[in-house]
Amino acid sequence: MSIELVNVPAHHALRQAADGLQSARRGLVVELPFNTTVKKTLKVVEEAIEGEGIDPSVMVFKPPRPGIGPKLRALALEVTAFETSSASKPKQIQSTVDLGSDPIRRPRPSILAALRENAKENAKPWIRPQDPHVLVIEPKLDEAKLASIPCRLTLSALGGAEQVFRLDDQEALWDTGAHMAVITEDLLDEAFLQHLTEPIHDPYRNRLGTQVTCSLRLGFSNQAIEMDLIMLVTKREHLPNHRSGIILGQHTCLNRVSYTSTPAAVMRAKGQHIPENLWGRLELNDYFDLHGKIVEF
């Protein structure tokens, strides 16, 4: 098997070798005179490595191509600008799908039973189970760079009562790093929030809030669909940047959907026009219901 050789400046190779040594033996110390040479330094270091009985592996990467440095610095400045900016609105995907105005159907009894079981599992004490986000994202870095998708939704409590809450003309953050779907309390009315405090809903409650049934109508770039899922009602303080709104996360939502994402930058690179205020396209391939059946559309 042939070994690929990489041409790199010598000092660049030594720097990466030093990184490998630091990872293997951070505390390794050698004794050198104040004035010495490169060859003598390398010899002392080599003897110290042999004395330790180690030979750390090194991945030799090519240095950045000429001219790429300014582009990388520009990207870094862009991220810094987002850290200090007041922008907090994600970009919506490109979609002309009509979500309609008719009432969204309630879940069938069999679906509702499955949702209740999912909610009970969510309420169990895992390592950091209830956190809506797997990662704590720095404020502003999750904004204006992620996709949002138009939606309408109807919420109902899992405890069996018939009280519902409806929201139209919403935008939900499409967040693959979120553990589950989330909606912040400030979007709901006082009557529904008070209803969720009743003891009948205790099995679906954890330290961050109360889980509810969400009947959701989503407008992908190419198709509108309806899904029944679990959504956590929580306070803004529990989300990155204390953001207000709806986040669609993995559990019972994104992990049921097969889709193709095409960011606006990719579309423009292909010569396709898309307005600057749009994230790009999320195109639905297929998805399955809570019975594990692929939904035809």
Image (cartoon, grey):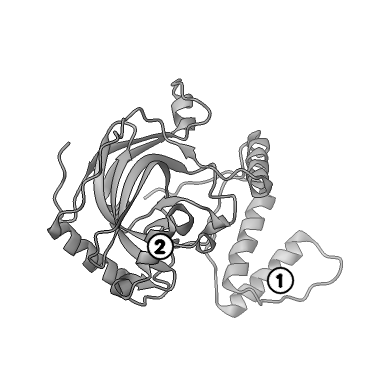
Q: Residue 35: horizontal and vertical position, in percent?
A: 86, 66
Image vertical order of residue 89 relative to residue 229, above or below:
above
Image vertical order of residue 247 relative to residue 282, above or below:
below
Q: Residue 5: horizontal and vertical position, in percent?
A: 51, 46
The residue under label 2 is 193
Q: Quadrant of residue 77?
A: top right
At label 2, counting other C-alpha atoms closer than 10 Å, the crowd grade (few under 14, some 14-19, many 20 or more) is some
Foreground tag (2 vs 1): 2
At label 1, counting other C-alpha atoms closer than 10 Å, the crowd grade (few under 14, some 14-19, many 20 or more) is some
Mark nearer the N terminus (2 vs 1) = 1
Q: Name the residue at the front extreme.
A: 191
What amino acid is at disc 2?
Answer: Leu
Q: Residue 47: horizontal and vertical position, in percent?
A: 65, 74
Q: CA distance from mark 2 to mark 1?
A: 70 Å
What amino acid is at disc 1?
Answer: Val
Q: Is residue 123 visible?
A: no
Q: Is residue 218 visible?
A: yes
Q: Residue at x 68, y 48 (%)?
A: 84
Per the image, label 2 sits on a secondary structure element best described as: helix
* Residue 44: mark: 1
